[in-house]
Image (cartoon, grey):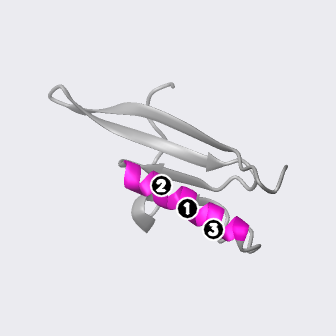
Amino acid sequence: MDARAHLFTVRLWLEELGSGRREPRGQVRYAADGRTRYFRDWQTLIAFLERVLAAAASGQGADGAGTEGPCGQGTEPQPTRGG
């Protein structure tokens, strides 16, 4: 992969909360190493992107592979619906 280019996949969906309420949810995955982050707000998505890109720019590579939970609070489960 070109060192100046980075590939991410982003999934977005509305989670049913009951009583007709829905909440936006999302998942971002860094294709180079598979790091995954679940989020409920844009700030969390942006923070993940900035952290990955800063690590890549400094030559540090992955700063912890695997799945990260929302705001560092553990792993959020996969969505219950197909999507």
Query: Is 10 situated left or right of 56 in this image?
Result: left
Measure the alpha-carbon separation of dots 3 and 1: 6 Å
Provide residue 12's location: percent of width, then percent of height: 46, 34
Q: Which tag, 2 or 3, sits closer to the chain's start? A: 2
Provide residue 73's location: percent of width, then percent of height: 40, 66
Which secondary structure lies at badge 3? Answer: helix
Identity of the residue drawn at 77% across and 73% down: 59
In the rendered image, the vertical position of residue 72 relative to residue 82, given as above or below: below
Mark 1 sits on what residue? Answer: 50
Q: Depth check: 26 or 1 in front?
A: 1
Q: Amino acid at mark 3?
A: Ala
In the rendered image, the vertical position of residue 60 relative to residue 51, given as above or below: below
Which secondary structure lies at badge 2? Answer: helix
Q: Please indicate, yes or no, whether residue 68 appears anywhere in the rendered image.
A: no
Whether the residues at callouts 3 and 1 have beta carbons within 8 Å, the answer is yes
How many other residues sit within 10 Å of disc 1, few (<14), some (14-19) or many (≥20)? few
Identity of the residue drawn at 56% across and 39% down: 10
Residue 54 - label: 3
Magenta stretch: includes residue 52? yes
Q: Please indicate, yes or no, whether residue 51 appears anywhere in the rendered image.
A: yes
Q: Which residues are magenta?
A: 42-57
Provide residue 65's location: percent of width, then percent of height: 67, 64
Which secondary structure lies at badge 1? Answer: helix
Task: Check the image and name the residue furthest to the right.
Answer: 1
Measure the alpha-carbon separation of dots 2 and 1: 6 Å
Query: Is 2 situated left or right of 61 in this image?
Result: right
